[in-house]
Image: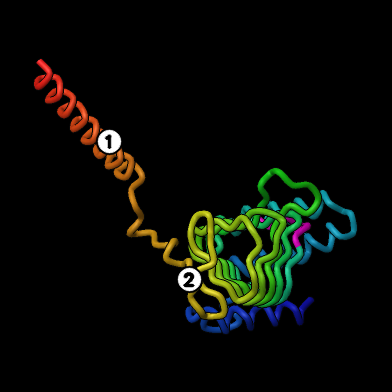
Amino acid sequence: MFSRLRYDIKAILERDPAARNSLEVFLLYPGLHALMHHRVANWFYRHNIKFIARWISQCAKFWTGIEIHPGATIGKGLFIDHGTGVVIGETAEIGDNCTIYQGVTLGGTGKDHGKRHPTLGNNVMVGAGAKVLGPFKVGDNSKIAANAVVLSEVEPNSTCVGVPARVARRAGVRIASASDLDQIHIPDPVSMEMCKLLVRIEALEKRIANNNEDNNKTL
């Protein structure tokens, strides 16, 4: 357990430029505190002492603002940066050396039973406010952009953005369909429908004008 704690502290020091020393990380980092509580709670959970496990996780939530269900499986070297609002569900699995920012949810959709929450591979980064929902896997070395909503499996070495999330890059190469992910130059569907209506009205007006001319000639 202490070797795991040393590894977790070292991982934070390597990934957080604001971390100055091990003592500061141990005493002042809520992400580490939540993880430490989870290790204990998970032990009780696996030994079917679930009330105590849940009590520990709720105490950790109160002190850190991070909610990790005691049933979640978490590998070594997880860095929860800032951490406020992070929620990790019961059947979630997190690999080694992952990074999770504030406001992230690893949750379910309410439609599944048994395995309900996502599995993160190794070295996965989940940006602030992102939601990963459902019993699928996010492959190793993948990145989820801030505020993305991921609802389906992600292949390794992918970068996902948008709502719902789509793969913008894979292994550093931009995906051809990534142009669909432009969040700035998005066509306005209301304007498009208005244009269609204006074109149709113009065509009808021409038909009416032509009919009136024909009627005048007949008279």
Residue in the image at 50% along x and 69% along y? 168
Can you tell which mark lies on residue 164? none
Residue 218 falls in which quadrant of the image? top left
Depth check: 180 or 27 in front? 180
The three-letter code of the residue at mark 1 reads: Arg
User: In what element is the residue under mark 1?
Assistant: helix
Where residue 82 appears, as percent x and y from the top left, is 53, 66
Which residue bears the numbered disc 2?
176
Residue 79 higher or lower than 161, as above or below = below
Residue 99 higher or lower than 203, as above or below = below
Magenta segment boundaries in residue numbering: 67-72
Depth check: 115 or 206 in front? 206
Asked if residue 81 shows in the view, the reply is: no
Where residue 188 appears, as percent x and y from the top left, is 33, 48
Which residue bears the numbered disc 1?
200
Residue 95 falls in which quadrant of the image? bottom right
Residue in the image at 50% along x and 62% along y? 128
Query: How far apart, in angstroms, are the residues tagged by discs 1 and 2?
Result: 35 Å
Q: In this view, does 52 lie to the left or right of 121?
A: right
Residue 176 higher or lower than 197, as above or below = below
Q: Residue furthest top?
A: 219
Q: Which residue lies furthest to the right in this view?
A: 47
Where residue 36 appears, as percent x and y from the top left, is 71, 68
